[in-house]
Image (tube, grey):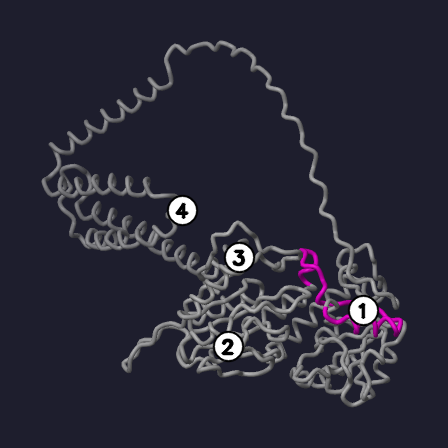
Amino acid sequence: MRIAIPREVHSGEKRVAATPETVEKFISMGFSVAIETNAGLDAAFPDSLYSQAGAEVVEDVTDLWAQADLVLKVRSPLPHPKLGIHETELLQAHSCLVSLVQPATNPELLDAIKERGASALALDCVPRITRAQKMDVLSSMANIAGYRAVMEAASVYGSFFGPQMTAAGKAPPAKVLVIGAGVAGLAAIATARALGSQVRAFDTRLATKEQVGSLGAEFLELTFEESGEGEGGYAKVMSDEFIAAEMALFAEQAKEVDIIVTTALIPGRKAPVLITRDMVESMKPGSVIVDLAAENGGNCEVTRADEHVNHNGVHILGYTDLNSRLATVASRFFGNNLLHLLDDLGGNDDWALDLEDEVVRSALVVHNGEIIWPPPKVEPPPAPPKQEAPKAVEPPAPTPKAVPSEPPAKKQNLGQSLMLLVTAIVLFVIGTKAPQDFIQHFTVFVLSCFIGWQVIWNVSAALHTPLMSVTNAISGIILVGGLIQAAGGAPHLSNITPGFSDMTLASTLGATAILIATINVAGGFLVTQRMLAMFRK
């Protein structure tokens, strides 16, 4: 099968449907690949790289489409500015278009593909299920758009995002509100937090609260027993009461925040207006609104698609080409999504559009000249039948056990008593025979052992690793004492150690203390270093 990759004709679109790396992988899967001249030039992929990857660079657009079995595009087909015809007229009856289609708002495009007797896979209809995550173009592009939205806001905002304190003065952190905690919203939250700003977020789906909190942002919550969770992980239309409370919240927040990023979209519908003109006029001069829904009408009443509007000192950015502003990485992500899709469809050798496959059936909007969108709803699996609770069974009567002649507790108490007695005798002997200097050092030693044992024993096991760092300081003291002992500064011990000289015993004990403390210090720092490495990116 032959794959054709035409150059995008949408105004301002710099992405390309495949990179040289993905082209090479397409060829390894058995496909032959042809690409239009300069198709990847705006994404920093010149024709020479595609040629090296094994693709055929074709200058004639008509010939490129005519010989294609699969046409990979980013944007849906549009009128071609050079040929003067619509791109769908270049589709062949046996071919399959793979691109963003937006069938809910593009019924005329489906009719045009149907007339050509072709097929079309809509990348924006790939279901959001676990198996299809690697093919989810919308998520990968939304991730880029959320990041770029914050970067665009930073380029317009007249201050720092994070707090700054210098000799010339200080600047507080920017306050950012993100409306919608989907993929784009979470990317915007993460980026704004990374720049040091204070971030708060709102979403109708309470399931996103934990995700927002994990990124260090504050989740704004309404006290409503209504979930905004729709089909496929998207938001749904909420009740009038909820919307009224939601708008009141946004009106209050607009007066406080410096930057608002809106990402609210409902599939198949015009984007809901969440930021009214009055809210914009209540914002501080210099504030910024980035409307990621501008292409679908916008979440802000003042938004104009592809324009930077200055309304009473408030900047409203309605750019629809945020992905193209990071065309290189966006093309890589897009190409990888397509690579996984074609691999899932069997590659060149086992290519099949299996209508029983949930991913294929959801994304295939036109099949051999027949419109089959929307797909039938997938019924959830039936709940497992309830099992009857097992009847209570009376336990058997306990079997009497022989009572030992002497309980274990008594034996344990006897052993402890003997241990205490022996310890008391040893301490009495040391107290009556040892020199005064030794008694002082020995008392400190015993108390240190007791206190240290109590401290370590009563500390949670989860804190033993960081506690190792603290014990290094204690080990440092032991090292100093050991050095003094090894150097001959020990008290006279001949009275309690006959047969050994003072210097020999002191040096031996000091050297032993130095060895053990050194191992503890080195091990403590090694464990601490490994623990800190786990938190480094």
Towards the viewer: 347 or 141 = 141
Helix, strand or loop under label 4: helix
Residue at the spot of label 1: 120
For the residue carrying disc 2, how many other residues have a C-alpha within 10 Å: few (<14), some (14-19), or many (20+)?
some
- Position in image of residue 185 (x %, y %): 54, 66
Q: Which tag, 3 or 4, sits closer to the chain's start? A: 3
Residue at the spot of label 3: 242
Q: Is residue 453 left or right of residue 45?
A: left
Q: Is residue 124 left or right of residue 297?
A: right
Towards the viewer: 172 or 319 = 319
Give the CA distance from mark 4 to mark 1.
56 Å
Examine the structure image and report whether residue 111 is included in the region drawn in magenta: yes
- Position in image of residue 283 (x %, y %): 42, 74
Q: Which tag, 2 or 4, sits closer to the chain's start? A: 2
Give the CA distance from mark 3 to mark 2.
32 Å
| Residue kind at label 3, given as amino acid type | Phe
Residue at the spot of label 2: 151
Examine the structure image and report whether residue 416 is included in the region drawn in magenta: no
Segment colored magenta: 105-134
Q: Which tag, 3 or 2, sits closer to the chain's start? A: 2
Give the CA distance from mark 3 to mark 4.
44 Å
| Residue kind at label 4, given as amino acid type | Ala
Question: Which quadrant of the rendered structure holds the N terminus?
Answer: bottom right
Towards the viewer: 473 or 110 = 110
For the residue carrying disc 1, how many other residues have a C-alpha within 10 Å: few (<14), some (14-19), or many (20+)?
many
User: Which circle, 3 or 1, is nearer the viewer?
Assistant: 3
**Residue plotted at (58% across, 64% down):** 183
For the residue carrying disc 3, how many other residues have a C-alpha within 10 Å: few (<14), some (14-19), or many (20+)?
some
**Answer yes or no: do the residues labelled 3 and 4 have beta carbons within 8 Å?**
no
Residue 462 image label: 4
Q: Is residue 14 left or right of residue 288?
A: right
**Answer yes or no: do the residues labelled 3 and 2 have beta carbons within 8 Å?**
no
